[in-house]
């Protein structure tokens, strides 16, 4: 990602332009009066959040991106606008070496080639006789024409030089075709089309840029069943998740990612409205892919096939950064590697098992509610292992019990949280019908290598009660002033930026608008709130890291002070969300009351007591105050904060 792209990714066009133009939401976009010409009758100025662009449909008839807006507004040239926006976004400007610039231009040329290939394959799918069986296959899999177009699905004709001739005639050189993975070199010399008589799937990175293709054979016994682009400068199979370009925003909003096995699973789920699904394209999940997900959510669900092949795939999926296990040896269930990743990422990774012999697209096409239940019932890793290793086995056989304990206990020992270890230890003991103390000694008589425990293997009830009471009552700052309320809210959000999604859903359910920088009175607090919202809205990095990197230097001291003043907050999500919701409501209520007092004073002081505009504004503010009064008790309703 170059400097310009990174700046665009970090700065929200609506927030930036909204500092100059009073914008109103209109569907997906925003509108207002153009700041570049005199007109207060028709709001002909539009901002498009998804593309990060703006346009005036009035006298100016001009438009562009955030750089163009700043250049036009300030009268700057591009370098001045670049430096200004880079400082705002916290991006360190760097100069490309000649080699780097040449590579960038090469990559852009290859992406153009791949975009042309999408058009080429789509033409052969929709406009040729040879493509009809492929189109029928897709329709038999319940895909609509709109879905086929949205996902760039096509058909590679059955021949060795269809693509080669097409692209060379369009001016592409053979070395470019090789570099893009579109052709394969013969040992004897020359090249031929890599994809032949296959349904093609356009593979894009998380920013929507073409990287390569996946392709499914249409031959009954064709091998391999799926064929991907080779490793290229653009295509790194271990660093890409299929569907991430379309799933990223939904993953962040739903605070959950679902990982499935293949292209068709992802596409069918998105078509059914489950837009948080991605796929590692049939390989083991890599650490890089998990990091891509972690930038958007801590909760990841592996929903893989439950038939024989699916079980092997599940085991592959749980062996991170391991070899691909294409050999014929039996796979080992290396859940410990997954647990280590879960702990290192501070993530919540769970396993969802599908009905035997069913793929996700089978389930969702038959009954979307069944898919919802399957995902809702996803189990933590240890619980899944416990069930998987005991399925169909005689649990009364002492040797079976020993084998199961030998596989599950190392996982329990690896858990970093003492209460989680205790919970699973008790569960395994009940499951195997043995005493917990028996599980604390391994088969060689050695003591359990785990965290501290209470005498007798279980924490006293009163100790557990004390812990639960402590977790339920985080130390909250006093709320004796609006400024302190603002400090509390910002302290919570700086530590937990993704709380914004649940907070906004709760506010909207209460009939109120989403959190805005204008909710805060302090100018520095407004800037901090704006930075938090920008960090959450981008799709390329962990919000906490973006927030730290993008904060202007002028806000560092204030941010440090807020974090220091809220350092004693405990990480009990539900309680913190309740208090966050209540405090936002209280801040708004105080602001409304202050405005009401001011407006009523103006009315009393006015020479004419029939000032309609003032009275209308008082009426509107009074309605908002009533809504806020009704909203406050909703904080204790867990469904409104978690729904």
Image (spheres, rainbow, N blue to C red):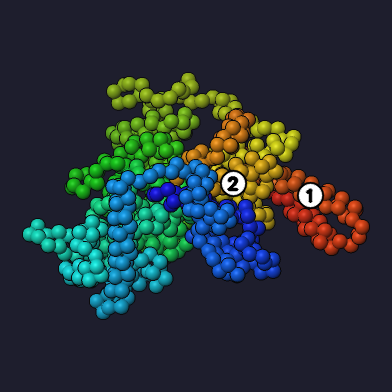
The residue depicted at 43 percent of the width and 61 percent of the height is 270
Above or below — where is 345 with respect to 539?
above
The residue depicted at 69 percent of the width and 35 percent of the height is 484
The residue depicted at 29 percent of the width and 66 percent of the height is 117
Q: Which image quarter: residue 636? A: top right
Residue 112, image x, y percentages: 32, 62
Nearer to us in this view, 542 or 168? 168
Residue 17, image x, y percentages: 59, 55
What numbered label is drawn on residue 595?
1
Question: How busy is the neighbourhood of tag 1: few (under 14 within 10 Å), some, or many (20 plus)?
Answer: some
The residue depicted at 82 percent of the width and 49 percent of the height is 598
Nearer to us in this view, 468 or 266? 266
Nearer to us in this view, 307 or 55? 55
Give the mark, 2 or 1, whose residue is nearer the N terminus.
2
Q: Is residue 389 visible?
A: no
Count of all numbered marks drawn on residues in the image: 2
Above or below — where is 11 with respect to 165?
above
Above or below — where is 548 with respect to 262?
above
Residue 597, image x, y percentages: 83, 48
Q: Is residue 321 visible?
A: yes
Asked which secondary structure carries label 1, the reply is: helix
Taking the image as shown, residue 77 lies to the left or right of residue 401, namely right
Residues at marks 2 and 1, CA–CA distance in whole angstroms: 23 Å
Above or below — where is 364 with respect to 431?
below
What numbered label is drawn on residue 368?
none
The reply to whether discs 2 and 1 touch (Cβ–Cβ < 8 Å) is: no
Q: Which residue, given by chain and number where applicable, does mark 2 sit on?
A: 530
Taking the image as shown, residue 641 lies to the left or right of residue 335, namely right
């Amino acid at each position: 990602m170059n400097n310009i792209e990174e700046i665009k990714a970090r700065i929200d066009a609506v927030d930036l332009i909204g500092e100059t133009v009073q914008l109103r939401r209109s569907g997906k976009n925003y509108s207002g009066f153009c700041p570049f010409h005199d007109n207060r009758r028709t709001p002909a100025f539009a901002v498009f959040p998804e593309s990060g662009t703006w346009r005036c449909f009035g006298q100016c008839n001009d438009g562009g991106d955030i750089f163009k807006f700043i250049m036009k507004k300030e009268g700057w040239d591009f370098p001045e606008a670049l430096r200004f926006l880079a400082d705002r976004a916290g991006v360190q400007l760097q100069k490309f070496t000649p080699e780097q610039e040449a590579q960038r231009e090469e990559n852009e040329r290859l992406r153009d080639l791949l975009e042309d290939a999408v058009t080429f394959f789509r033409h052969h799918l929709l406009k040729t006789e040879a493509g009809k069986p492929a189109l029928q296959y897709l329709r038999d899999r319940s895909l609509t024409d709109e879905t086929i177009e949205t996902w760039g699905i096509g058909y590679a004709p059955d021949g060795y030089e269809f693509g080669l001739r097409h692209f060379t005639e369009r001016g592409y050189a053979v070395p470019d075709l090789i570099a893009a993975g579109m052709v394969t070199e013969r040992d004897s010399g020359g090249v031929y089309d890599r994809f032949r008589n296959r349904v093609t799937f356009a593979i894009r990175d998380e920013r929507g840029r073409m990287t390569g293709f996946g392709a499914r054979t249409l031959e009954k016994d064709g091998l391999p069943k799926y064929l991907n682009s080779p490793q290229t400068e653009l295509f790194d199979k271990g660093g890409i998740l299929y569907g991430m370009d379309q799933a990223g925003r939904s993953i962040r909003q739903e605070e959950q990612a679902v990982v499935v096995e293949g292209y068709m699973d992802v596409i069918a789920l998105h078509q059914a409205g489950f837009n948080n699904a991605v796929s590692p394209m049939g390989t083991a999940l890599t650490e890089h892919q998990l990091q891509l997900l972690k930038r958007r959510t801590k909760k990841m669900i592996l929903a893989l096939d439950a038939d024989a092949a699916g079980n092997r795939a599940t085991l592959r999926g749980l062996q991170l950064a391991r070899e691909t296990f294409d050999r014929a040896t039996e796979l080992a269930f290396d859940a410990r590697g997954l647990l280590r990743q879960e702990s290192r990422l501070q993530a919540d990774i769970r396993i969802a098992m599908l009905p035997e012999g069913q793929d996700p697209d089978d389930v969702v096409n038959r009954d979307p509610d069944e898919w919802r239940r399957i995902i809702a019932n996803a189990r933590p890793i240890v619980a899944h292992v416990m069930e998987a290793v005991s399925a169909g086995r005689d649990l009364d056989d002492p040797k079976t019990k020993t084998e199961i304990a030998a596989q599950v206990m190392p996982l329990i020992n690896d858990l970093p949280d003492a209460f989680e270890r205790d919970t699973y230890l008790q569960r395994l003991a009940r499951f195997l019908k043995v005493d917990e103390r028996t599980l604390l000694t391994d088969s060689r008589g050695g003591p359990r290598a785990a965290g501290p425990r209470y005498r007798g293997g279980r924490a006293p009830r009163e100790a557990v009660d004390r812990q639960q009471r402590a977790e339920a009552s985080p130390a909250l700052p006093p709320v004796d002033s609006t400024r302190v309320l603002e400090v509390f809210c910002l302290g919570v959000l700086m530590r937990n930026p993704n709380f914004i999604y649940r907070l906004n859903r709760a506010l909207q359910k209460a009939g109120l608008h989403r959190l805005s920088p204008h909710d805060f009175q302090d100018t520095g607090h407004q800037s901090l709130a704006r930075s938090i919202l920008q960090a959450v809205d981008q799709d390329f990095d962990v919000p906490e890291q973006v927030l730290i990197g993008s904060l202007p230097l002028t806000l560092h001291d204030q941010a440090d002070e807020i974090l220091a003043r809220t350092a004693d907050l405990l990480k009990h999500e539900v309680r913190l969300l309740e208090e966050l919701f209540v405090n936002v409501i209280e801040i708004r209520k105080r602001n409304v009351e202050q405005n009401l007092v001011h407006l009523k004073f103006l009315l009393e002081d006015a020479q004419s007591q029939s000032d309609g505009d003032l009275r209308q504004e008082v009426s509107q503010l009074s309605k908002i105050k009533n809504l806020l009064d009704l909203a406050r008790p909703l904080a204790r309703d867990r469904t409104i904060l978690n729904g």
